[in-house]
Amino acid sequence: MKSTTSKHTQNETAPKGVTAKSDAAKGLRDLFEDQLKDIYWAEKELTKAIPKMIKNSTSDELIEALTAHLEETKKHVTRLEEAFTVIGVKAQSKKCEAMAGLVREAEEIMEATQPGVVRDAGIILAGQKVEHYEIATYGTLASFAKILGETKAASLLEKTLNEEKAVDQKLSEISNSINVDAVDEDMEMADTHTKR
Ligand SMILES: [Fe+2]
Ligand SMILES: [Fe+2]
Protein backbone atom coordinates (compact mmCIF):
# COMPACT_ATOMS: atom_id res chain seq x y z
CA MET A 1 0.00 0.00 0.00
CA LYS A 2 1.69 3.11 -1.22
CA SER A 3 -0.80 5.89 -0.69
CA THR A 4 1.37 8.96 -0.25
CA THR A 5 0.31 12.39 0.96
CA SER A 6 2.17 15.49 -0.18
CA LYS A 7 4.08 15.37 3.11
CA HIS A 8 5.38 11.90 2.34
CA THR A 9 6.43 12.96 -1.12
CA GLN A 10 8.30 15.91 0.36
CA ASN A 11 10.14 13.63 2.77
CA GLU A 12 11.10 11.26 0.02
CA THR A 13 12.70 13.99 -2.09
CA ALA A 14 14.29 16.05 0.71
CA PRO A 15 17.25 14.79 2.78
CA LYS A 16 15.65 12.23 5.07
CA GLY A 17 13.61 13.80 7.86
CA VAL A 18 15.44 17.12 7.75
CA THR A 19 12.65 19.23 6.23
CA ALA A 20 9.93 18.00 8.54
CA LYS A 21 12.15 18.31 11.60
CA SER A 22 13.34 21.84 10.94
CA ASP A 23 9.80 22.94 10.05
CA ALA A 24 8.60 21.71 13.43
CA ALA A 25 11.55 23.29 15.22
CA LYS A 26 10.91 26.59 13.46
CA GLY A 27 7.20 26.38 14.31
CA LEU A 28 7.91 25.69 17.96
CA ARG A 29 10.48 28.46 18.05
CA ASP A 30 7.96 30.94 16.59
CA LEU A 31 5.35 29.83 19.10
CA PHE A 32 7.87 30.15 21.94
CA GLU A 33 8.85 33.69 20.94
CA ASP A 34 5.23 34.70 20.42
CA GLN A 35 4.23 33.45 23.87
CA LEU A 36 7.24 35.15 25.49
CA LYS A 37 5.94 38.44 24.06
CA ASP A 38 2.49 37.61 25.42
CA ILE A 39 3.65 36.92 28.99
CA TYR A 40 5.95 39.96 28.83
CA TRP A 41 2.88 42.14 28.19
CA ALA A 42 1.00 40.30 30.95
CA GLU A 43 3.73 40.83 33.56
CA LYS A 44 3.99 44.54 32.75
CA GLU A 45 0.20 44.83 33.04
CA LEU A 46 0.36 43.12 36.44
CA THR A 47 2.83 45.68 37.78
CA LYS A 48 -0.04 48.17 37.31
CA ALA A 49 -2.88 45.88 38.46
CA ILE A 50 -1.37 44.50 41.69
CA PRO A 51 -1.08 47.95 43.39
CA LYS A 52 -4.85 48.40 42.89
CA MET A 53 -5.46 45.00 44.49
CA ILE A 54 -3.24 45.96 47.44
CA LYS A 55 -5.15 49.22 47.91
CA ASN A 56 -8.43 47.31 48.01
CA SER A 57 -7.27 44.63 50.47
CA THR A 58 -7.83 44.79 54.22
CA SER A 59 -6.14 41.61 55.52
CA ASP A 60 -2.56 42.33 56.64
CA GLU A 61 -1.46 38.92 55.43
CA LEU A 62 -2.98 39.50 51.99
CA ILE A 63 -1.46 42.99 51.72
CA GLU A 64 1.93 41.54 52.70
CA ALA A 65 1.70 38.68 50.18
CA LEU A 66 0.61 40.96 47.34
CA THR A 67 3.25 43.57 48.16
CA ALA A 68 5.99 40.92 48.10
CA HIS A 69 4.61 39.53 44.84
CA LEU A 70 4.54 42.98 43.27
CA GLU A 71 8.30 43.15 43.81
CA GLU A 72 8.67 39.64 42.35
CA THR A 73 6.51 40.62 39.38
CA LYS A 74 8.85 43.53 38.62
CA LYS A 75 11.66 40.95 38.66
CA HIS A 76 9.65 38.75 36.30
CA VAL A 77 9.61 41.61 33.80
CA THR A 78 13.40 42.02 33.90
CA ARG A 79 13.91 38.24 33.90
CA LEU A 80 11.88 38.05 30.67
CA GLU A 81 14.06 40.79 29.20
CA GLU A 82 17.07 38.62 30.11
CA ALA A 83 15.39 35.63 28.44
CA PHE A 84 14.88 37.66 25.25
CA THR A 85 18.56 38.63 25.37
CA VAL A 86 19.85 35.07 25.81
CA ILE A 87 17.75 33.79 22.89
CA GLY A 88 18.88 36.74 20.75
CA VAL A 89 15.46 38.33 20.24
CA LYS A 90 14.51 41.96 20.88
CA ALA A 91 12.22 42.26 23.92
CA GLN A 92 8.77 43.10 22.61
CA SER A 93 5.35 42.82 24.18
CA LYS A 94 2.15 41.67 22.54
CA LYS A 95 -1.22 42.27 24.20
CA CYS A 96 -2.33 39.19 26.09
CA GLU A 97 -6.14 39.13 25.81
CA ALA A 98 -6.40 36.43 28.49
CA MET A 99 -4.52 38.49 31.09
CA ALA A 100 -6.41 41.64 30.07
CA GLY A 101 -9.61 39.69 30.79
CA LEU A 102 -8.37 38.41 34.15
CA VAL A 103 -7.35 41.93 35.22
CA ARG A 104 -10.75 43.26 34.13
CA GLU A 105 -12.43 40.53 36.14
CA ALA A 106 -10.39 41.52 39.22
CA GLU A 107 -11.55 45.13 38.80
CA GLU A 108 -15.17 44.06 38.44
CA ILE A 109 -14.96 41.93 41.60
CA MET A 110 -13.47 44.83 43.57
CA GLU A 111 -16.25 47.14 42.37
CA ALA A 112 -19.01 44.64 43.14
CA THR A 113 -17.94 43.77 46.71
CA GLN A 114 -17.90 45.57 50.04
CA PRO A 115 -14.43 46.28 51.46
CA GLY A 116 -13.45 43.70 54.07
CA VAL A 117 -13.46 39.92 54.13
CA VAL A 118 -15.61 39.49 51.03
CA ARG A 119 -13.56 41.83 48.85
CA ASP A 120 -10.39 40.22 50.22
CA ALA A 121 -11.77 36.81 49.24
CA GLY A 122 -12.58 38.16 45.77
CA ILE A 123 -9.05 39.55 45.39
CA ILE A 124 -7.63 36.15 46.34
CA LEU A 125 -9.89 34.50 43.78
CA ALA A 126 -8.86 36.89 41.03
CA GLY A 127 -5.20 36.67 42.10
CA GLN A 128 -5.17 32.89 41.99
CA LYS A 129 -6.69 32.90 38.50
CA VAL A 130 -3.83 35.16 37.42
CA GLU A 131 -1.23 32.91 39.08
CA HIS A 132 -2.64 29.79 37.45
CA TYR A 133 -2.43 31.45 34.05
CA GLU A 134 1.19 32.35 34.77
CA ILE A 135 2.00 28.86 36.06
CA ALA A 136 0.56 27.29 32.88
CA THR A 137 2.49 29.70 30.68
CA TYR A 138 5.86 29.51 32.44
CA GLY A 139 5.67 25.73 32.83
CA THR A 140 5.07 25.23 29.12
CA LEU A 141 7.54 27.89 28.02
CA ALA A 142 10.27 26.37 30.20
CA SER A 143 9.79 22.99 28.52
CA PHE A 144 9.68 24.59 25.05
CA ALA A 145 12.97 26.34 25.89
CA LYS A 146 14.55 23.01 26.86
CA ILE A 147 13.33 21.31 23.68
CA LEU A 148 14.79 24.20 21.65
CA GLY A 149 18.13 23.91 23.46
CA GLU A 150 17.70 27.31 25.17
CA THR A 151 18.85 26.11 28.58
CA LYS A 152 19.63 29.57 30.01
CA ALA A 153 16.18 30.82 29.07
CA ALA A 154 14.68 27.63 30.52
CA SER A 155 16.28 28.21 33.91
CA LEU A 156 15.15 31.86 33.98
CA LEU A 157 11.59 30.78 33.21
CA GLU A 158 11.71 28.06 35.85
CA LYS A 159 12.87 30.53 38.48
CA THR A 160 9.78 32.65 37.82
CA LEU A 161 7.57 29.55 37.65
CA ASN A 162 8.63 28.62 41.20
CA GLU A 163 7.80 32.09 42.50
CA GLU A 164 4.35 31.94 40.87
CA LYS A 165 3.73 28.54 42.47
CA ALA A 166 4.85 29.81 45.89
CA VAL A 167 2.53 32.82 45.86
CA ASP A 168 -0.36 30.66 44.64
CA GLN A 169 0.24 28.39 47.63
CA LYS A 170 0.39 31.42 49.94
CA LEU A 171 -2.90 32.76 48.57
CA SER A 172 -4.52 29.35 49.16
CA GLU A 173 -3.41 29.48 52.80
CA ILE A 174 -4.75 33.03 53.26
CA SER A 175 -7.96 32.04 51.53
CA ASN A 176 -8.58 29.28 54.05
CA SER A 177 -8.27 31.64 57.02
CA ILE A 178 -10.25 34.44 55.37
CA ASN A 179 -13.14 32.17 54.45
CA VAL A 180 -13.37 30.84 58.00
CA ASP A 181 -13.44 34.36 59.43
CA ALA A 182 -16.11 35.41 56.94
CA VAL A 183 -18.30 32.47 57.88
CA ASP A 184 -17.77 33.13 61.61
CA GLU A 185 -18.67 36.80 61.26
CA ASP A 186 -21.75 36.02 59.23
CA MET A 187 -22.86 33.48 61.81
CA GLU A 188 -22.23 35.89 64.68
CA MET A 189 -24.27 38.55 62.91
CA ALA A 190 -27.05 36.07 62.28
CA ASP A 191 -26.94 35.05 65.97
CA THR A 192 -27.22 38.62 67.28
CA HIS A 193 -29.99 39.24 64.82
CA THR A 194 -32.08 36.29 66.01
CA LYS A 195 -31.39 37.12 69.70
CA ARG A 196 -32.80 40.63 69.34
FE1 LIG B 1 4.80 36.83 37.25
FE1 LIG C 1 2.44 36.11 39.56
Image: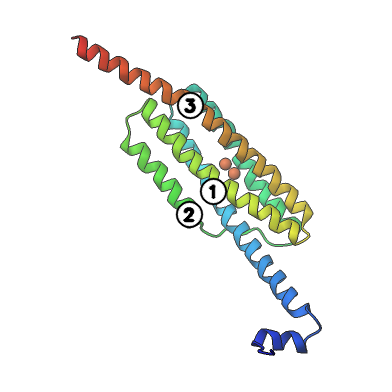
| Residue for point 66% across, 40% down | 162
Q: Which residue type does callout 1 highlight?
A: Tyr
Q: Which residue type does callout 3 highlight?
A: Asn
Report whether 68 appears left or right of 182.
right
Quadrant (top left/top right/bottom left/bottom right) for the N terminus: bottom right
User: What is the secondary structure assignment of the residue under circle 3?
Assistant: helix
Displayed-image quarter of ligand 1: top right
Q: Which residue is mark 2?
A: 98
Report whether 81 appears left or right of 175.
right
Few, some or many C-alpha atoms within 10 Å of disc 1 (few <14, some 14-19, many ≥20)? some
Report whether 69 appears left or right of 4.
left
Quadrant (top left/top right/bottom left/bottom right) for the C terminus: top left
Which residue is most to the top?
A: 195
Which one is nearer the viewer's eye here, 170 or 111?
170
Q: Which residue is mark 3?
A: 176
Residue 41, horizontal then vertical, whole percent = 55, 53
Depth check, mark 2 against mark 3: the one in front is: 3
Residue 57, horizontal then vertical, whole percent = 43, 29
Few, some or many C-alpha atoms within 10 Å of disc 2 (few <14, some 14-19, many ≥20)? few
Depth check, mark 1 against mark 3: the one in front is: 3
User: Picture quarter containing residue 167?
Assistant: top right
